[in-house]
């Protein structure tokens, strides 16, 4: 099954986020190995987008909150594992040494 948002085919979770934000994630997160000039240009573009869309941080926060709420059972499904002690190590019992 193919999914489309506004005429764009969605093929990954990243596509959903980028279409919701209206910008690529790399703009906000950066890319590995970018030069100082590339970083400065990226940050300048991000500042310009935020100036033109002052409600963007609120939309991002709302999308994140909705995702957490929708997937909270999976996110917080924690299983505790038994603690294994290393062989030969003595457990501290407190008190002063005699």
Image (spheres, rainbow, N blue to C red):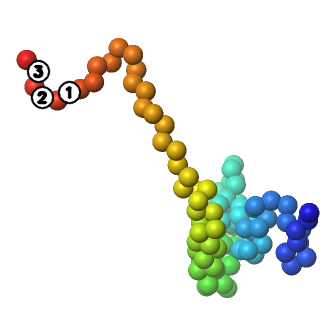
The reply to whether the C-beta atoms of the residues labelled 2 and 3 are less than 8 Å apart is: yes
Q: For residue 15, say whether it is visible.
A: yes
What kind of element bears circle 1?
A: loop
Which image quadrant: the C terminus?
Answer: top left
Q: Nearer the viewer, mark 3 or mark 1?
A: 1
Q: Which residue is mark 1?
A: 93
Image quadrant in which you'd find residue 63: bottom right
76 or 96: nearer the viewer: 76
**Residue 75, position in %: x, y?**
58, 56
Q: Which residue is mark 2?
A: 95
- In the image, 93: left or right of 66? left
- In the image, 91: left or right of 98? right
Image quadrant in which you'd find residue 40: bottom right
**Residue 70, position in %: x, y?**
64, 68
Measure the C-alpha gap from mark 3 to mark 1.
10 Å
Q: Which residue is mark 3?
A: 97
């Amino acid at each position: 099954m193919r999914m489309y948002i506004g005429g764009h085919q969605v093929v990954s979770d990243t596509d959903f986020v980028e279409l919701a934000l209206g910008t690529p994630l790399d703009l906000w997160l950066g890319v590995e190995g970018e030069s100082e000039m590339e970083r400065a240009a990226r940050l300048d573009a991000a500042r310009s987008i935020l100036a033109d869309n002052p409600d963007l941080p609120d939309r991002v926060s709302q999308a994140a909150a909705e995702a957490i709420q929708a997937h909270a059972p999976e996110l917080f499904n924690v299983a505790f594992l038994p603690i294994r002690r290393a062989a030969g190590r003595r457990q501290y019992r407190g008190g002063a040494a005699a």
